[in-house]
Image (cartoon, rainbow, N blue to C red):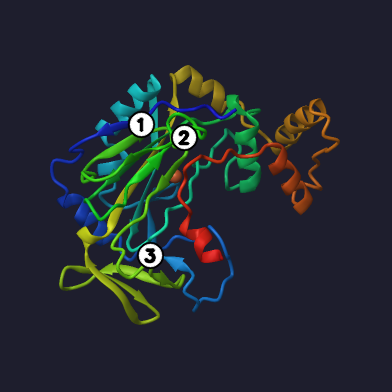
Amino acid sequence: MLRYADPPILLENVFPDVTQVHKLLEREAPYTPLGGWYNPGADPHARTRPMWFQNDWVHDVYAAEGSELFLHNPTYIEAAKNFYNAEVIEPHSVYVNIMAAIVDGGPAHTDNSRFHGRERANTPMWLLRAMLWSDLFDDYEIVQATAIWWLDDVEEGGLYFWPDGPDRPPQHHVEKMANTALIGDNHGMFHQVGPVGPFDRGTILVTPSAQLSPSENGKWVVTDHGEKIYTAPLSGYRVSVLWKANVYKNHEEREQKSANPLTMTNVINIFNDDLEEKNTGFHLTSDNLEDTETISTISAIYAEAKPINALKSVFETIRQ
Ligand SMILES: [Fe+2]
């Protein structure tokens, strides 16, 4: 079973001065709609996406100028050490979400796991999800700490989270969110972005080519195929910055785990032992790994939990 995380730690007044964050936001513009959740290859002129913009500030091969403000944030590192009772915290990713006018929630989910030797670059996403929910690969998981920080208070724009597990009602962090952060285990704990105002125009949809940028008058503008769709001061958008770090109890654990990366053959063998024990009659091979039937069978056997009292996701609403 998925471990049920402790409630996240709330940090307040994270930055004494947010001017540096404003500069970083401006330098890293434009922002583009979140992609990959649904409908790949859709008509590029169809308005199929909510105003949920995203940009990476730090990943494997990139670090935005000034992003160390978040990446090496000593408050985050200290909080992550306390949360996990761990000595080694290795920050690796920072990204930003900027949202407005979304009447429904985001998807209720846990973040995607990483395992030593297996990650998105070399393993299909559905298999990584099944690995998480099977609980067969816990020894290989790279434990992740996540911090979410909010720039301003906006209309709604809260975060629901399920610290007591998916079968218990969620808690809600909303209002007085400006310059606060929640730090905890978003890989073990379901969470969901609540509706984001303003709500007077309903959910405003854009095409995958839309861009969000600051304009000369200080407002931030969504432009879509040359047309201005939406204009508001930055404080009218829900801006959140996410930070992720690898967590190890100590250096010995890091060394030991790193020395034993999972190969795809290991993954197949571990699943097959369990499939046999469960008398499923199903056998994974490197040849049937990409089959639709394999995906549906494995995803059904190692099914994901569904958290109660979750809001409908805007991505479901758009698909209908
Ligand atoms: Fe998440």
Q: Which mark, by number, is residue 8?
A: 1
Q: Is mark 1 within 8 Å of ligand 1?
A: no
> Looking at this rendering, what residue extends furthest in the bottom direction?
226
Q: Are marks 3 and 1 in contact (CB under 8 Å)?
A: no
Between marks 1 and 2, how big is the CA–CA gap?
9 Å
> Which quarter of the rendering shows the N terminus?
top right
Image position, residue 257 (x, y; %): 55, 24
User: Disc 1 marks which amino acid?
Assistant: Pro
Left or right of 290 on screen, residue 204: left
Between marks 3 and 2, how big is the CA–CA gap?
25 Å
Q: Which residue is mark 2?
A: 189
Residue neighbourhood size for the residue with mark 3, other residues' Cα within 10 Å, grouped as few (<14), some (14–19), many (≥20)? many
User: Disc 3 marks which amino acid?
Assistant: Met
Nearer to me, 165 or 12? 165
Q: Pick whichever of labels 1 and 2 is earlier in the sequence.
A: 1
Left or right of 104 on screen, residue 43: right
Nearer to me, 204 or 95? 204
> Which quarter of the rendering shows the C terminus?
bottom right
Above or below — where is 266 with respect to 315?
A: above
Q: Which mark, by number, is residue 51?
A: 3
Q: Locate ligand 1 by image quadrant.
A: top left
Q: Pick whichever of labels 3 and 2 is earlier in the sequence.
A: 3
Q: Residue at x 78, y 50 (%)?
A: 293
Q: Residue at x 44, y 50 (%)?
A: 61
Q: Residue at x 48, y 51 (%)?
A: 107
Nearer to me, 138 or 266? 138
Image position, residue 306 (x, y; %): 56, 41
Q: Are marks 1 and 2 in contact (CB under 8 Å)?
A: yes
Image position, residue 34 (x, y; %): 44, 60
Inspect this view and state whether residue 300 appears: yes
